Image: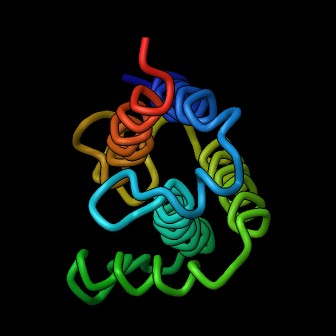
Amino acid sequence: MGKAAFLGRVRTARADLNEAISGLSEEQMSQDIVAGEWSVKDILAHLASWQNEALLAVERAERGETPGPMITESVDEWNGRRVAEWRRLPLVDVMQEFNATYDQLVKALDRWPEDTAPLGPADWDETCELWWLTDHDTEHLSAISVYRQRLDPV
């Protein structure tokens, strides 16, 4: 898989996620619990937080710095802390950051040379450090899709 296919997977997943949240009210996105203890807003904050960490690592690598680990605590602790920080923000701010961070990350990845993936180890495939970006939106899409089905039973 090359860079174009990698980015295509990222873009398709985001388009699918945006379709799933389209038409939800602010109350539905902010108050209804759709996965564990998370609302749709919490899921979007979670995704934006991880994409921001990936963006920072890519930017460090672009400058020739050692990217280092993206987080230094357990994933569950990190996720809980980030989502808690974002809960105090209005939905409009979370949505703005969700979209802006994604746009910045995709631009940074677009700038990266075709012949090697950022953060390695080599190719733009399942072995690359950032492969999770191709599946992360999709991973959370299923919870939102189930929620939508509860709202609009056929």
Residue drawn 62% across the image and 74% down it: 63
- The relative height of residue 122 versus residue 51 in the rendered view (above or below) is above
Place of residue 97 in the rendered image (x, y in percent of width and height, measured from the top left): 71, 65
- The relative height of residue 23 versus residue 120 in the rendered view (above or below) is above
28 or 105, which lies in front?
28
Q: Quadrant of the C terminus?
A: top left
- The relative height of residue 30 versus residue 127 in the rendered view (above or below) is below
Residue drawn 41% across the image and 38% down it: 147
Q: Is residue 58 visible?
A: no
Place of residue 56 in the rendered image (x, y in percent of width and height, measured from the top left): 57, 73
Task: Examine the image and state in which quarter residue 41 appears.
Answer: bottom right
Q: Quadrant of the N terminus?
A: top left
Which color scheme does this rendered protein use? rainbow
Task: Examine the image and state in which quarter residue 149 appears.
Answer: top left
Place of residue 69 in the rendered image (x, y in percent of width and height, measured from the top left): 32, 79
Residue drawn 77% across the image and 60% down it: 96
Q: Is residue 54 left or right of residue 15?
A: left
27 or 85, which lies in front?
27
- Figure disc tally: 0
- The relative height of residue 147 versus residue 71 in the rendered view (above or below) is above
Q: Is residue 27 visible?
A: yes
142 or 139, which lies in front?
142
Q: Is residue 56 left or right of residue 138?
A: right
Residue drawn 71% across the image and 58% down it: 95
Place of residue 82 in the rendered image (x, y in percent of width and height, measured from the top left): 46, 81
